[in-house]
Amino acid sequence: MEIIRVEDSDLKVIEANRCRVFRAMSLPLSAQVIWDEIYAKQRQRVIIICNTVSQAQGVYRDLSSLNHECELSITLLHARFLPEHRAKKEKYLTDIFAENWRDNNDNTCQVLIATQVIEAGINITCEVLHTQLCPMNSLLQRAGRCARFSGESGEVFVYRKMEVNQENQELANTDLFEWEDATDLSIGASVEGLNSENIETKKSKESFLPYQKEICELTWQVLQAHTESEIVSHHVGFRIEEQWINLVHAEEDLLTLKRRNNSQMEFERRFADAVFRGDESAASDLIRKVDNRSIFTWEEPGLVDCDDEQEIDIQKLLPFSVPVSTICKAWRDFQESLAFGDDWIFKRIETPKNKSQTYSQPVLSSISSRDFLIGCYRILVNNRYIYYDEEIGLQIGVNIRGNRFNSTSKKERTITSQYRYWMDNYVGHLVLMWKCWRDNFSTKTLKNGEATDINYRSVRDELLVAGGKFIKNKILPQAEVNEAEALFEILVFLAIFTHDLGKLQVEWQDVMRGWQKIAHHRFEGKNPRKYLLAHTDYNPENEQLKAEFKAFEKKNKRPNHAVESAFLAKEILHRSLIPLLQEHFTEDSEQIKYFRDVVIMAAGRHHSAWARGFESKDVAKLKQIELCPESQQVIADSWRCMKKFLPSVLSLLEANLNRHVYQLQELDLNKFTADEVEFLQLYSLVVRALRLCDQRSVQLI
């Protein structure tokens, strides 16, 4: 890594004759302080940045209550607005707080109250910036919204504390709940004996959430020293900012590196948990401390009182990212107020267990404790406890007056869910997937519940070059570029070719052909005739069909197919991929095995990223895989239809299965460890291609 120093001659261009000064403020940041400063200095453009959404909402309410005569034009911006409302606000702000705002000024003081959402990506400026204390790197990002353009002057006031009026304190403190110190109340637990000191937000404890206190303290020390210096009224340019960053973050970065070195074994264990076993909490810890959860609310109020295990179409729910502290506060308040009569405030959105893989939409399940709640990453909120409007954004909690928030109306309600399928036969499905790999196409899709035109590039154009470069740079450096790309394409070809072999089971076909006959006779579906099927007609928006399908499933359990496909793929790969690798690339048996395992993992995990495979108990229960008599013919037909569109850079031998009954053996899909991470990364590219082709192919029927 090379450090590039900005030359003084370049700084003159960067600084552009601006003047920006900083001061650490001893008094708390409050609406009254802002109001007084505006009138004392006759401000026209003012920005206030808070560390949390709830604090920004509280300050907004306070300042609005002072603005009786509407002398100020106040805008609130944060991450908990609907996309269309946020976009509208951002467009307005980029006009009002633009570089040339003085040219169009009507003497109205424009005030923006915001959060970190304006630290980057929005090109605005102001005369004065009031901000809560935060780490130095974030602070300087915020300061970039003050005196941003050439010739401007501005002041940045940094406040260690914030004060909100009594009537808005609960709102402002919503995101500051010290959930790690609070007592966990489970459903049905008694709240007797818990005093307010045990369960109230610890207001006396200084909070810099969502930031760590230590790094904020270091930032404050630097700002205080500057404020007490003789150059406090001088412009803080790039060189001073550079010094501040080093003073604050160099020490923290060294401490982080030291902690990492001292806990290398723990890091490697957590890395393995995240990458190889799919532990979401471990992944979050390794990247950064992520304390937000995605919350959803029903579009249709009639669906609020939902039962556990009710399936939901996640595409039709609007997500908001909310701190876990906010969710835990709402949980605690709800447990104390069960007398309201509701039996739930949150439900977990999860992948259903023991459900068929093809049509498995997420389902809802109960949340019984705070610890369980914290472990949920997608949460449905009872919309009795949600308030939303375009002015203040989303609020969540027991003590707000909910307005049964619903999502915005859809432009075209006829657009189908991503979980809708049409009947296609086995060969046709693979051919359509291979077409998605090769060709561009246009269609409509759901985005935030609305119909959106979308043009898909071929998956080949998206991933082939990256896959080829990865193989050449990380695994087979001796290979030519065109050979590495051809090998990647063959891996994708084989992943597509083998990923549904498990659907050729007699039992799978019997169940799904039985359902397709019902769909044909009662719901105008296609006639299954004698085809071996890959999908059947299924539309979750047709309530009658959906109910009929659920009733059919209860009587006719469909076997899984993904891990079965991986098991059967071994024979196909032994006859096709392994000879190709031996002839063109390597005699290294370990490398050949790893390439084979890439395809096996992709086939076995194309529905569930953490499918384990077949354990001894699975082998004892399932015993064998019995395939339909026509299986070999449709496998041969699939190969013939797909292979003719495969570039002939490398020769690939045709492969098929040679039996109809296979005795099961144990199969471990956790194929790679940290020592083979490059093959795990290659698997990620291959399975990405497989999933994209699979998802898009149903839109071509």
Image (cartoon, rainbow, N blue to C red):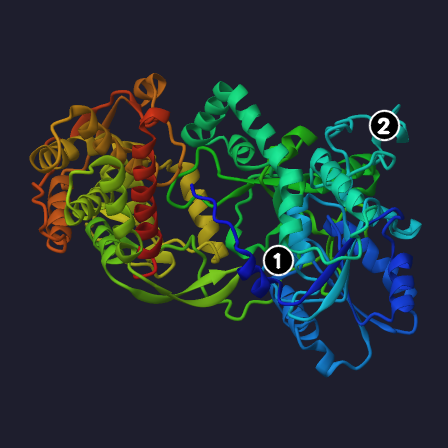
In the rendered structure, which disc, 2 or 1, sits on the residue that comes first in sequence?
2
Viewport quadrant of the C terminus: bottom left
Q: Nearer the viewer, residue 484 or 609?
A: 484
Residue 191 point in image, percent of width and height: 84, 28
On the image, the x and y values in percent for residue 502 come to: 26, 37
Q: Is residue 259 above or below residue 76?
A: above
The amino acid type, in three-letter code, at marker 1 is Glu
Residue 292 vs 281, above or below: the answer is below
Evaluate whether residue 369 shows in this view: no
Left/right placement of residue 20 relative to residue 601 reads right
User: Residue at image x 50%, y 70%?
Assistant: 412
Distance between the Cα atoms at labels 2 and 1?
Answer: 37 Å
Residue 416 visible: yes
In the image, residue 636 sits, relative to residue 433, either above or below, namely above
Indicate left or right for 242 with 7 as reference: right
Question: Residue tagged by mark 1?
Answer: 299
Q: Is residue 332 left or right of residue 456?
A: right
Label 2: state its secondary structure.
Answer: helix
Instruction: Say what amino acid the circle numbered 2 marks.
Output: Asn
- Residue drawn at 30 percent across, 46 percent down: 690
Callout 2: 10 Å neighbours few (<14), some, many (20+)?
few
Quadrant of the rendering where the N terminus is positioned = top left
**Picture quadrant where residue 293 is located:** top right
228 vs 672: above or below: below
> Which residue corresponds to mark 2?
198
Q: Name the image quarter holding residue 494.
A: top left
Percent position of residue 268, x then y: 46, 23
Residue at 77% across, 46% down: 226
Residue 416: x %, y % from top left: 44, 61
